[in-house]
Image (tube, helix red, strand yellow):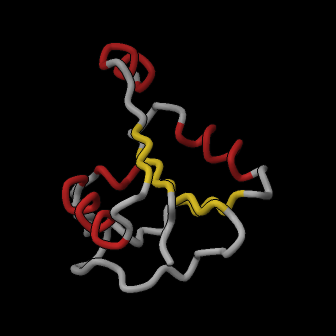
Amino acid sequence: MFPEVFHIGTLKTGSTTLQNILSQDERLNVVIHSRSFNVGSETPSSYPYFENGKLNIETDENICRKYGGMVGLEESLNRIKRVNPNASIVFFCREQRAAIKSMY
């Protein structure tokens, strides 16, 4: 079994706040930064964090990165599609000027 929902954020888009809010709901199994889909050479064959009876959400703003062993957004999305083609994907982004100002 694999997550039904994937949250992919980028830096400074409120990902951490969303993760904290979702983690407070006991109906949800929120898995933060498992690296199951964005690290390694293969698509995962299992997902040890899955909890029956809950909505499983994998959330990681690093899914879109490609460095330090991370495979990047395209390969991560391909892996997600292979294990759960019906998964919902929520992608957070931010207007570029506001993001640069926030990072500064």
Question: In terms of image quadrants, where is residue 96?
Answer: top left
Residue at the far bottom in the pictured view? 45
**Residue 83: x and y, percent?**
35, 73
Report the label total.
0
Q: Is residue 61 above or below residue 1?
A: above
Residue 68 in view in this figure: no
Residue at image location 50% in from the left, 78% down from the top: 1
Question: In terms of image quadrants, where is residue 54?
Answer: bottom right
Residue 28 horizontal side relative to residue 4, left or right: right
Residue at the far front in the pictured view? 86
Residue at image location 29% in from the left, 63% down from the top: 81
Residue at image location 51% in from the left, 65% down from the top: 3
Q: Is residue 95 above or below residue 64?
A: above
**Residue 38: x and y, percent?**
32, 65
Q: Quadrant of the C terminus?
A: top left
Residue 77 horizontal side relative to residue 62, left or right: left
Q: Viewer-proximal residue, 82 or 44? A: 82
